[in-house]
Amino acid sequence: MNAATKQRINEAQVRNFFAAWAPAWRWVLIVGLRDLRANLRRLGEMAATEMDNDSWKADDYVYGPLALGITAAAVNEAAQHCEDLFALLTFARDPMDFVKRMTSYAAGKVTGLSKRLMTEGDDGLRKRFLLPPTAVIEDGLSKAEDPEKAVAAVEEAVKRLLDLVRKVTDWYLTYEFFHLQYKHGFKLPLRPFSGTLPPETIDKRKQDVSAPLIAFTNENLAQMLARPPGQQALMMLLTPETQPHINELIADRALLRYQMSGPEVNLDDVVEISRSVYRLLFLIQRNRLSVSNGPDEDGQQVFYLPGAAANETVEARLEPSTPVLLKDFR
């Protein structure tokens, strides 16, 4: 099989992959988790009935472990949604092995991209989203009724996309630690402080969909201090036996502590982050297919960008002098 044949097969499989793909499903799941959080009493009563355990419908449990657990689950799914985005941004432009790489990769291969995205220049991000440079857009819109206005509108949408991807990436980096801890259920202290929940805490959690995010940590001191102040570990109560050995225990990573997320997590915000991720996934998909399919019978290629409204997509319908090809984005 020569290179040209392999590339044609790759493009056909790219189209098959996207035809079977559903990039919104994690967002839908997070909407469902928000609904659970908004109706915790219903969930507690269901659980209590299933296991014949009335303690599970008590406010202390419902607005304690249940509220914290669902918050952590929603953040975990949104972080995983971000990782889906990072994977697609990593492999979408592969001309030969998209399927092989997209369906079998080490997690570190894509999560490492998150830090690079925060510093990557505009040109690099445009390429990742398969968006032609300004010169190609100007050429492709030269026949528009008002070319200058049309180009300005597209460039404004490009900026909107770049801001969106950096916002999503910043959110991921903020909550990555908690996402990783969630994978190990023993690292979630769902009853983090001894005693019953204060009535004011229960009342507050009945009124909104917010809750703190807390994880066990045994990080060394340097790692802990490298985090933002709001996410530095909160020491557990120390016993007389451990007090004299704090430094040694921390250095040995043998002292259990809590790590807080800073401000409480509002699931409305998590839903919106996941909505943004879905939009970005959708845009990459459409742009990758546009490049794969080439110009239509009228010589036009359409590229997709986020609109000003949360659910709006902008189409940049270009008539470039030469077709925009996948190799243009390498």
Image (spheres, helix red, strand yellow):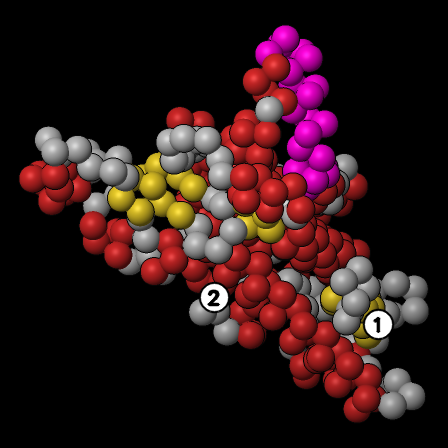
Q: Which mark is residue 190?
A: none
Of residue 12 and residue 317, the one placed in the foreground of this image is: 317
Q: Please state if 37 lies on the left or on the right of 322 as rendered.
A: left
Q: Amino acid at mark 2?
A: Met
Q: Amino acid at mark 1?
A: Arg
Of residue 62 and residue 298, the one placed in the foreground of this image is: 62
Of residue 132 and residue 257, the one placed in the foreground of this image is: 257
Residue 151 placed where, x, y %?
A: 77, 84
Q: Residue at x 55, y 27 (%)?
A: 61
Of residue 161 and residue 48, the one placed in the foreground of this image is: 48
Q: Please state if 48 lies on the left or on the right of 140 as rendered.
A: left
Q: Which residue is mark 1?
A: 317
Residue 112 placed where, x, y %?
A: 42, 52
Residue 114 placed where, x, y %?
A: 47, 56
Q: Secondary structure at mark 2?
A: loop
Q: Which mark is residue 118?
A: 2
Q: Is residue 140 above or below residue 97?
A: below
Q: Residue at x 68, y 83 (%)?
A: 135
Q: Earlier in the sequence, mark 2 or mark 1?
A: 2
